[in-house]
Image (cartoon, rainbow, N blue to C red):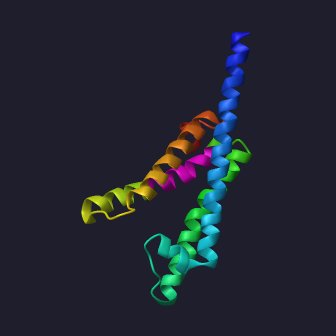
Amino acid sequence: MAKSALLGRVNSLRTLLIGLIFVAGMFNLFLGISFLYDPAGMGGQFGLSPNGPLGFAVLRADFTAFFVVIGLCMLRGAWKRNGDVLLVPAALFAIAFCGRALTALLNGTQAGFFEPMAAEAAQFVLLVIGWRWVPHHKIDELTG
């Protein structure tokens, strides 16, 4: 009986984890779409302003791609219970976090600097835990 109760709790935690990944994926997807239709407004929230058509293109293309890819991978990984797909947004968040950390070391910080880092770190941890708890392949199977 105890083993059954433990299995039920593990499944409940896994369901909660998948739900959190799905909600975070929706948030990132909508963030990416927002950059597509309002690059100046969204860029301003990230401390950026477009400088002519090239600036609009960078905000509209690069930020949309970043957040839409993250969002779609999180949604697919959660919906299909595929932990492998969760490694893509985890890697993107890790790279973004490292870039911000390097900026903090080289250029300093300002008000509001650490909130995006906290969001990236939290989602990275969520995705790595998700990758471990959701069915996935071993790393050797993916790379070899």
How many numbered discs sit on the rendered protein?
Answer: 0
| Of 143 and 3, the residue lying toward us | 3
Screen quadrant of the C terminus: top right
Q: Residue 25 falls in which quadrant of the image? A: bottom right
- Looking at the picture, how far across and down is residue 69, in whole percent? 61, 61
- Looking at the picture, how far across and down is residue 127, in whole percent? 56, 44
Q: Is residue 55 visible?
A: yes
| Of 54 and 121, the residue lying toward us | 121
- Looking at the picture, how far across and down is residue 12, in whole percent? 70, 30
Q: In the displayed structure, does residue 48 sit left or right of residue 10?
A: left
Q: Is residue 141 visible?
A: no
Question: Residue at image x 53%, y 83%?
Answer: 56
Screen quadrant of the N terminus: top right
Main SS, magenta residues: helix
Residue at the limit of the structure toward the bottom, as seen here: 52
Q: In the displayed structure, does residue 131 sit left or right of residue 99?
A: right
Residue 14 higher or lower than 94, as above or below: above
Q: Residue 117 falls in which quadrant of the image? A: bottom left
Residue at the limit of the structure toward the top, as seen here: 1
Range of magenta residues: 84-95
Residue 5 higher or lower than 134, as above or below: above
Question: Residue at image x 64%, y 45%?
Answer: 20
Question: Residue at image x 50%, y 52%?
Answer: 91
- Looking at the picture, how far across and down is residue 67, in whole percent? 58, 63
Asked if the magenta segment contains residue 72, the reply would be no
